[in-house]
Amino acid sequence: MNKLISAIALTSILVLTQACSEVSTLSNAEEPKPIVKGTHDDHANTHKHGESSHDDKKTSVETTIAEAKLTTPLNMLPNTIVPLLIDVQNPNGEPVKTFETFQEKLMHLIVVSDDLQFFNHLHPNYQNNGRFKVAASFPKAGKYTLFSDYKPAQSPEQISVLKTQIGGESPSATPINFDRSKTFGTAQINLISSQDHIKASEEVTLTFDLKDPVTNQPLTDLQAYLGEKGHLVIIKKSTPLTASDYIHAHALADDSAGKVTFATKFPTSGEYKLWGQFNRNGKIVTADFGIHVRD
């Protein structure tokens, strides 16, 4: 079985910096500047596209190549489209200006609410001089964590963890749903694990079995998404969310109709949320599931 590297090469825990101008007046001349420097998380893995293995070697803070800073408008409200600015800098505070494409993009931005009920996968556009920009909206009040995944030129992938908050009254916490069979639009998806009881630090395979909900036949119209058969993001339920709670897995080579398999490890016991993403005729299907991991 092919192996997968789910990788977080170097990590940064970043503090939110909010903008001083309103969304309607945001322009190149008026864009607010990030002013709070973040600290670093010592969690690290290595990642290579198309392979699968795990490297638990720690990387020291001194070898950090880059960190990111987030700038947003002030007083963001639910369901309002706002610009997010992400500035990538080296440890001396200088812009990192050159990036390499990986998984067909220069940056992948995973946005989740801290209760893990909301998920979005965005691709910010590079604005030069280390700055990325993307439009986003947040569905409800509360705290959000953004995992920024990028690759400075001739360097390992970096994960920066960014924080923001949406104003208003936060809804009551919703527990994670642990059902293994769900329907997402026109896809019925069953989640199958290689172990009945998943244990921490043991490799496990997770298979998404996609079928037509009407005919119950395997889907045969899945296409590549960002160069792969599917993508899987896994986040542990934690307070606060950190880089060590984040896993990004890649699909294994498998020609089975309607099935996409991933291999990974869960570092510690607890509750995890999974989001598998698949391309069906140009429309991205995002399937979320909950997993219990034991000691």
Image (cartoon, helix red, strand yellow):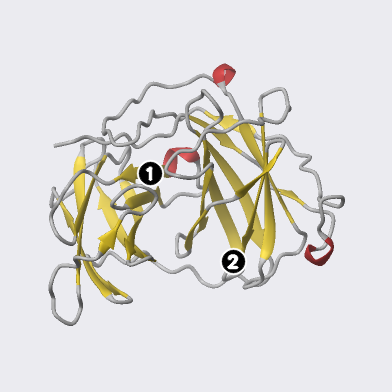
Camera-nearest residue between 272 and 173: 272
Crowd class of label 2 (few under 14; some 14 to 19; many from 20; radius 10 Å): many
Residue 134 is left or right of residue 7, and the answer is right
10 Å crowding of disc 1: few (<14), some (14-19), many (20+): some
Q: Residue furthest right?
A: 29
Residue 295 drawn at (x, y percent): 24, 41
Q: Which residue is drawn at 47% across and 27% down?
A: 156
User: Looking at the image, is 280 positioned above or below residue 160?
Assistant: below
* Residue 178 visible in rendering: yes
| Quadrant that contains the N terminus | top left
Q: Which quadrant would residue 265 be assigned to in this image?
A: top left
Q: Where is residue 48 in the image (x, y as percent from the top left)?
A: 35, 31
Q: What residue occupies the far bottom of the structure in this picture? A: 214
Q: Do the residues labelled 1 and 2 touch (CB within 8 Å)?
A: no
Q: In this view, does 186 lie to the left or right of 12?
A: left
Q: Is mark 2 on a helix, strand or loop?
A: loop
Q: Nearer the viewer, residue 283 or 266?
A: 283
Q: Where is residue 54 in the image (x, y as percent from the top left)?
A: 30, 29
Question: Number of numbered discs present?
Answer: 2
Q: What residue type is labelled 2?
A: Phe
Q: Mark 1 points at which residue?
A: 248
Residue drawn at x 43%, y 69% is 174
Give the residue type at disc 1.
Answer: His
Q: Is residue 213 above or below residue 222?
A: below
Query: Is disc 1 placed on a helix, strand or loop?
Result: strand
Disc 1 from disc 2: Cα separation: 22 Å
Q: Residue 86: where, in percent of width, then height?
A: 66, 45
Q: Which residue is drawn at 24% across and 66% down?
A: 221
The residue singled out by tag 2 in the image is 138
